[in-house]
Amino acid sequence: MTHIWIRAEERPNERRVAVTPSGVTELIQAGFRVTLEEDPTRAIPLADYPACSLAATGSWRNAPKDAIILGLKELPEDDSPLVHRHIMFGHAYKGQPDGARLLKRFERGGGRLYDLEYLTDDTGRRVAAFGYWAGYAGAAVALKCWAAARSGALCAPLTGFASAGALQDHIDKDLGTDARPKVIIIGALGRVGSGARDFCLAMGSEVTCWDMAQTAKGGPFPEILAHDIFLNCILANASTPVFVPASAAGVPRALRVIGDIACDPSSAFSPIKVYDCTTSWEHPALRVHENPILDVTAIDNLPSLLPRESSEDFAAQLLPSLLGLHDMAQGVWGKAAACFDEHVSKLGTGTAS
């Protein structure tokens, strides 16, 4: 019997979960054994879940070796070997500083990473993504940063919201009755960009939507500097041009806030060169230039601002693939395993990225 172990998220301000109560019911009915770790901060209360095996927070470390550990965000950082098969966002394949360290933990323990970002169908499209809600929440944070920057302040700490409507009301109050910012979105045709666009339009902003056709020339892109807010909604790769060079911070510009919703500043492929580190719920904005102000917000768990809605959406997308876990050599799981093997094989050569 295939054993799925749904771990608690041990990262601060992370309340999402990869499987909803109805999903657990379907998995059990399909013949899976399900263990659910207790997590008092999870957006979906434990009482909503059907009867299944319960375990203490963090007890996945002592789970049976054949259990498949399912989570979302990264594991606590240490150097302990990883012996299990893990499903999560690993952030290990694009040259991130901690990526090789994580892969070496798997290599030492004999475990394997099935990275949620690399679960793709036959067309190469991801089977499950938080993209829409990342874009929606990321646009909200960028507008909040812009509202603060008008008076020279940095954005105040963030908290989660019970619903999208509550988030809209909160940002609307921050913006007040003044004119709304002009926003440019790159990646506007994707899931992330569509969420960002929907939030900005709901706030009454004028929105310029760009995608591959508008960036194919390779830059420079002075149009970005002519907007109040720039939202980056693409996952960059080696062919992605630079959207905001380091020199942009000190030139005349309308641009006051960059919302790097893709949020991969440590990657060599990052198209935004005015900063190199993520921001946080406690400190949402990083001021990279004073006169004129330029703030960057780059939070890597944005959908957790709307944990219930984003969890339900993502879980519904992921469930069909989870139901195929009985055979991990095929389909999306087989491709994810091959991707892991490829990157682990490069560890000894120093080319893992």
Image (cartoon, grey):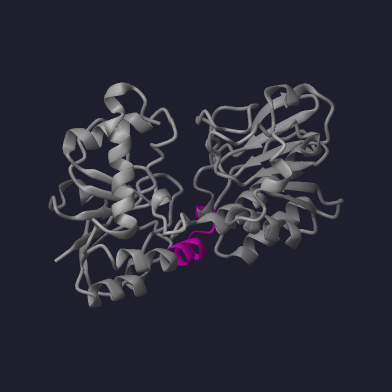
* Occupied quadrant, residue 291: top right
Q: Quadrant of the C terminus?
A: top left
Q: Is residue 223 above or below residue 305?
A: above
From the viewer's perspective, tell me whether residue 73 is left or right of residue 69: right
Does residue 322 appear in the picture of this structure?
Answer: yes
Mark count: 0
* Occupied quadrant, residue 109: top left
Q: 36 or 1: nearer the eye?
A: 1
Does residue 48 appear in the picture of this structure?
Answer: no
Rendered location of residue 315, percent (x, y): 41, 65
Q: Is residue 270 above or below residue 6?
A: above
The residue at the point 83 percent across, 36 percent down is 254
Span of residues in magenta:
304-314
Q: Is residue 116 above or below residue 169?
A: above
Main secondary structure found in the magenta portion? helix
The residue at the point 39 percent across, 54 percent down is 119
Q: Quadrant of the N terminus?
A: bottom left
Rendered location of residue 8, percent (x, y): 32, 53
Rendered location of residue 299, percent (x, y): 55, 42
From the viewer's perspective, tell me whether residue 258 is left or right of residue 158: right
**Magenta-colored stretch includes residue 305:** yes
Q: Is residue 317 above or below residue 142?
A: below
The residue at the point 58 percent across, 36 percent down is 283
**Magenta-colored stretch includes residue 245:** no
Q: 201 or 304: nearer the eye?
A: 201
From the viewer's perspective, tell me whether residue 56 is left or right of residue 189: left
* Occupied quadrant, residue 194: bottom right
Rendered location of residue 342, percent (x, y): 31, 38
Identity of the residue furthest to the bottom in this view: 29
